[in-house]
Image: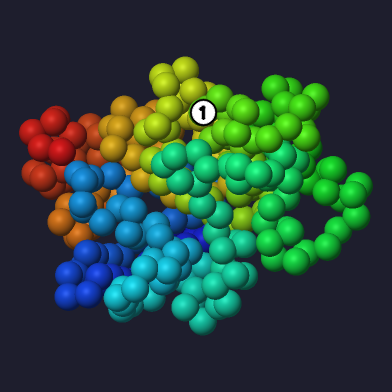
Amino acid sequence: MESTILRIEDFSAYFGENQILKDINLSTSKNLVTTLMGPSGCGKTTLIRCVNRMHELIPGTKVSGKIYLQNKDIYEMEPIILRRQIGMVFQKPNPFPTMSIYDNVIAGYKLNGIRLGKDEFDKIVERSLKNAALWDEVKNSLYRKGTFLSGGQQQRLCIARALAMNPEILLLDEPTSALDPKSTTQIEELIVELKKTTTMLLVTHNIAQAARVSDYTAFLYLGELVEFGLTEKMFTVPKDKRTEEYLTGKFG
């Protein structure tokens, strides 16, 4: 791939004695959406958690192989620096409940002890909320708690919080699974818009969603990468029978 930003090589992950990921090889380029798809328990969430080393927060995990961000080995980077460069949005919207909308957006700066003037923070908050398609809805209530927003707005606030740090990559772990159809559509439209400036890895169970928003799709099954390629091509002429069976609803 041209302008490869993330490269995963011969990567395996274990929880205790259980091998969750088996020799994954995958790369993605700038400003593309790559979907990780597959049945529950196939390793999708584990893989994206390994990409920003969140798996290290769980005791008994170990990994082998390499993951490179812009040709830097992520396991040789400080985890805090790495997580600034690889943002993460989870299944359930999780704004910090005691913080205002404004403080939620700049939470990454405060938690990392990065000091900036109020003017700078104002600019970051406005830019990030605009990028998350939320500014017009909240610009008059920035100092209200983030938790007063609807579920879909809370998820866009979490996306704004991740974007505020200018990450190289944004990881989205089933970002619409807890949302209603209207909010889901808004997040999907946002993903398509963000693609102009942001590289994303998206975990989804929703095959139609993958078809609508992603450029490339990786199909995982029982911890193995079965197939990886252009979404449109995979969804029309899958190379592997297991991919075809998954896409046609034979299992999932």
**Residue 12 drawn at (x, y percent):** 27, 71
Instruction: Decide if residue 196 is in sight here.
Output: no
Q: Is residue 134 left or right of residue 14?
A: right
**Residue 158 drawn at (x, y percent):** 58, 42
**Residue 84 drawn at (x, y percent):** 62, 62
| Rendered position, 79 above or below 243 | below
Q: Closer to the camera, 211 or 93?
A: 93
Q: How is the image coloured?
A: rainbow
Which residue lies at the image location 68% right of the left edge and 35% below the top edge? 145
Badge 1 amino acid:
Gly
Quadrant of the frame with the C terminus: top left
Which residue lies at the image location 34% right of the left edge and 40% below the top edge? 204
Disc 1 residue crowd, few under 14, some 14–19, many 20+, Cα 10 Å: some
Quadrant of the frame with the N terminus: bottom left
**Residue 187 drawn at (x, y percent):** 51, 30
Residue 43, quarter of the rendered image: bottom left
| Rendered position, 130 above or below 164 | above
Which residue lies at the image location 30% right of the left edge and 65% below the top edge? 25
| Rendered position, 54 above or below 144 | below
| Rendered position, 22 above or below 133 | below
- What number of labels is visible? 1
Q: Closer to the camera, 228 or 12?
A: 12
Q: Is residue 187 left or right of residue 197?
A: left
Instruction: Decide if residue 139 is in sight here.
Output: yes
For mark 1, what is the residue? 151
